Amino acid sequence: MPAVAKFAFPIVWTFLVLGLLFLAPAGAGQVDEMYRAGVTARLEQRFDEAAGLLARASRLQPENADIWVQLGFALSAAGQWQEARAAFEQAVMLAPAYADAHRGLARLAFWRGDLDEAGQRLATARALDPRNEETALLERQVALARAASDRSWRLDIGASASDLSDALPSWKEGSVRLSRKVSPDVRLAAAVRAAERFGASDSYFEARLDYQLDPKIRAWLFAGSTPSADFLPETALGVGASVKAGDGKGWLGPAVLSGEIAYFHYRDDDVVRLNPAVQLYLFQGRAWVTLHAIITSSAKAGWTGGHVARGDLQLNDRLRIFVGHGDAPDLSDGQIIPSRSLFGGIALAISDRVSAVLSLTRTELKGAYRRNDAGLAIAVEF
């Protein structure tokens, strides 16, 4: 027995020490390492991983306001806004003079559409850190949103003329669209489009509903009709949605993913069009690239597809240029005709309420004709 006791004592002591080590709280060095890894993951846009690391660090050091602020940023970017708000509020409770925490709460309020709270939070952040550029940028965004919220109506007027090859008569087209924001989330619109082609005239009427589910998700639907149609669709129905991904920091901005499905009934054919698209913003929104896939199914022609690519560059606060290329089916008189097009133009903000877009397009329809289009569109908010 004495020999057994002699060996049992060091074994029990070893397990006791190991158990205490496992049960001991994490040291400051371990938490610091976890914090740095979480911040790095956030900056590299691995937001879920960042949130997980920073949440663990916050549990180990709940009195550390820096951890709560970084957790709030990670959760915001991951779309977990309620959890992000709680993290920022915890940081403010621990450190009332923490300007980043107030800015984080201001941005969440701005995304929710609560401009009053956003303004109050920004005023606090401004008092704590008067020269911060991020505060100034967010203040401008809130000011623009306030101005836009005062303008519930928008009028869009467009006109275009087309010159056709092979001595074919030119086309003319005009449109008017009136929309009203009836609530912060809902916009209603009505439009009429009048077109003249080859001596025939059509007038197409459309109603549209846009609904903002949250600041990153939007959905819409439309219905249209052409009485006594010659070449425009007799009836049209469509539904679509878009979602914004990413927070837009750095040179690579957020992406907007969208999709639409529409049905068109012509005099002698039915057409279904699928339109998935991605819009990628670059250089903090000063430029963006849009890629559309256009897939159509016709009772006569079957399935066909193509694409349209476009690039926009914001030269300054008022002037934007764009160019693009299309290789997609053209819907003309209910017929699906393969076509290629080049287009470009300029967009000018004449004032903070009036803007104009001038565009030029050259289209070649396979086995048919070439078409050169010139268009002018003007938008007025009031």
Image: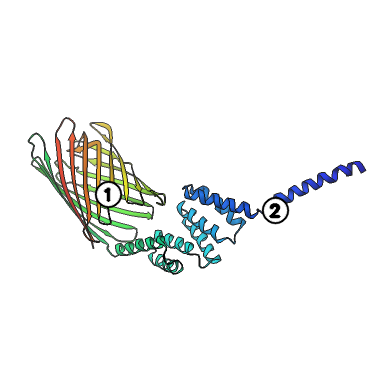
Q: Is residue 61 visible?
A: yes
Q: Please, which residue is most extreme toward the right here?
A: 2
Task: Tell me which numbered mark, 1 or 2, is placed earlier along the sequence.
Answer: 2
Q: Which residue is mark 2?
A: 24
- Report the disc number at residue 79: none
- Count of numbered circles on the image: 2
What kind of element bears circle 2? loop
Q: Could you tell me which quadrant the C terminus lies in? A: bottom left
Give me the residue at 41% from left, 62% from top: 135
Circle 2: residue type: Ala
Q: Is 130 in front, or is 95?
A: 130
Image point 38% across, 63% down: which residue? 136
Q: Position of residue 314 (x, y in %)?
A: 28, 51
Given this view, does label 1 or label 2 mark the residue nearer the observer?
A: 2
Q: Nearer the viewer, residue 163 or 231?
A: 163
Q: Residue at x 27, y 49 (%)?
A: 222
Give the quadrant of residue 189.
bottom left
Place of residue 239 in the rendered image (x, y in percent of width and height, measured from the top left): 31, 46
The amino acid sitting under disc 1 is Phe
Residue carrying label 1: 222
Q: Is residue 41 above or below residue 86?
A: above
Query: Is residue 72 placed above or below 292 in the rendered structure?
Result: below
Q: Taking the image as drawn, is residue 267 in sight?
A: no
**Residue density around tag 2, few if under 14, some if 14–19, many if 20 or more, within 10 Å:** few
**What percent of the width, then of the height, locates residue 110?**
39, 61
Quadrant (top left, top right, bottom left, bottom right) of the N terminus: top right
Please indicate whether residue 252 sits to the left or right of residue 1 in the image.
left
As measured in the structure, the alpha-carbon distance from the residue carrying label 1 to the one carrying label 2 is 62 Å
